[in-house]
Image (spheres, rainbow, N blue to C red):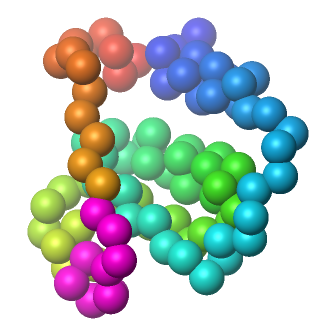
């Protein structure tokens, strides 16, 4: 099993049945480096988070373009606690 598949399966397995408030009037703009994981996150996360609109981008230009077109109320910065290796993306 590819590491991406394992990660997505682990996330699915860890999702509880707790109801989340309706967040359909909110948006999430996610900046990552892996287009495939971004695509999967857009499919997996919104139902868990109350169905916000979610857009994933993989470069700074796209991020800034989408970021500046919207009113922003919060900005979160998330970092990995270790460097990714090439085998992590298989």
Most common SS among magenta residues: loop
Q: Quadrant of residue 72?
A: bottom left
Residue 22 counted in the magenta span: no
Is 54 situated above or below 48?
below
Is 38 situated above or below 6?
below
Is 87 situated above or below 12?
above
Q: Quadrant of the N terminus?
A: top right
Q: Quadrant of residue 85?
A: top left
User: In the rendering, at what x and y percent does residue 58 appear?
Assistant: 26, 53
User: In the rendering, at what x and y percent does residue 45 appear?
Assistant: 61, 50
Left or right of 77, for residue 8: right
* Image point (35%, 77%), residue name: 73
The magenta segment: 67-75
Left or right of 28, for residue 81: left
Q: Quadrant of the C terminus?
A: top left
Closest to the observer: 58 or 28? Answer: 28
User: In the rendering, at what x and y percent does residue 8 appear?
Assistant: 60, 29
* Image point (27%, 89%), residue name: 69
Left or right of 57, for residue 82: left
User: In the rendering, at what x and y percent does residue 64 appear?
Assistant: 17, 73
Is 7 situated above or below 68?
above
Residue 15 visible to the viewer? yes
* Image point (21%, 84%), residue name: 68
* Image point (34%, 68%), residue name: 74
């Amino acid at each position: 099993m590819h590491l991406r598949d394992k990660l997505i399966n682990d996330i699915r397995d860890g999702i509880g049945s707790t109801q989340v408030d309706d967040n359909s009037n909110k948006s999430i703009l996610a900046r990552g480096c892996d287009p495939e994981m971004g695509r999967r996150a857009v499919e997996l996360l919104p139902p868990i988070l109350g169905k916000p609109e979610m857009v994933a981008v993989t470069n700074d230009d796209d991020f800034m373009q989408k970021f500046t077109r919207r009113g922003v109320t919060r900005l979160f910065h998330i970092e990995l606690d270790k460097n990714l290796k090439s085998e992590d993306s298989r």
